[in-house]
Image: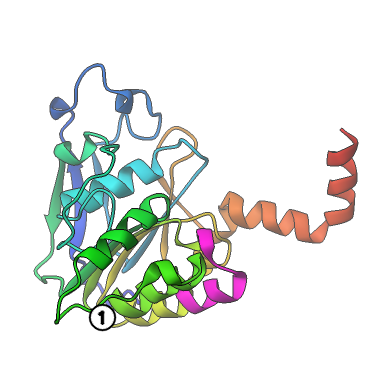
Amino acid sequence: MRGGSINRQFIQSIIIDWNKIERSSYLREVEALKNLKRLEFSSPVTFFVGENGSGKSTMLEALAVAAGFNPEGGTKNYHFSTYDSHSELCNALRLVRGYRKAAAGYFLRAESFYNVATKEEEYVDARHPSWHFHEKSHGESFLAIAQKYVRPDGLYFLDEPEAALSPQRQLTLLLEIYTCARQGAQFFIVSHSPILLGLPDAEILNFDGGQVHACTYEETDSYQVTKLFLENREVLLKRLLKE
């Protein structure tokens, strides 16, 4: 998917101006973020991984908002707010953009998807019929998003897209991402899924250990813990449940 040495990504890097962040902001206490000034992106697919609270979703959200998407999710045409929870990091981010312009885009947040699905029905018109996400299961709705909005030459931000998907559906989503990435799309994805993280040639940025750093698939906790459990299930459960 890398396609040579020329960086063809829509967002090639970000620069953080900490002067635009309040001294009292909790962002200055997040270990992976507090000393971060710049990040480079050269792969069509970038995963953010790390423990809960490590700052990965905060970064993804800030990227999406700085790129022009609604903080609660949706396309760039979505403009609503049910609960203003995004951080001020988006105001301090400067996006270094490439020469191409995205033809489409979407910001998927698992935690606010209900609100987006509701607004989707309100935004219906002759040119934009509803997909009736509320009438589908959670997993079916997530896949419907991919089928409707994920396209070649698009820019996508996905926060834990595996949350509602079975392993089989995760493989389906992986194929959608891989296919579109090979056709010019760019993805930023927060994930704990050992299935999605296995996508070939993706860049994985780990937010654990006090700083953002690249890692291999085999170095992720998602892979290591899953492998350990599958290979030692009975021993691990016996020890865990005994304790």
Residue 32 is situated, as x and y percent measured from the top left of the image, at 39, 35
Which residues fall within the magenta stretch? 163-173
Measured as percent of width and height from the top left, residue 206 is found at: 45, 47
Q: Nearer the viewer, residue 183 or 170?
A: 170
Q: Name the residue at 57% across, 67% down.
A: 195
Quadrant location of the C terminus in the rendered image? top right
Q: Is residue 86 above or below residue 179?
A: above
Residue 201 seen by the camera: no
Q: How is the image coloured?
A: rainbow
Q: Quadrant of the N terminus?
A: bottom left
Q: Position of residue 224 (x, y in %)?
A: 66, 53
Foreground of the two, 163 or 232? 163
Residue at left 18%, top 29%? 18
- Circle 1 residue: 152
Residue 8 belongs to the span the image colors magenta: no
85 left or right of 125 in image: right
Question: In the rendering, at what x and y percent does residue 94 appear?
Answer: 13, 45
Q: Secondary structure at mark 1?
A: loop
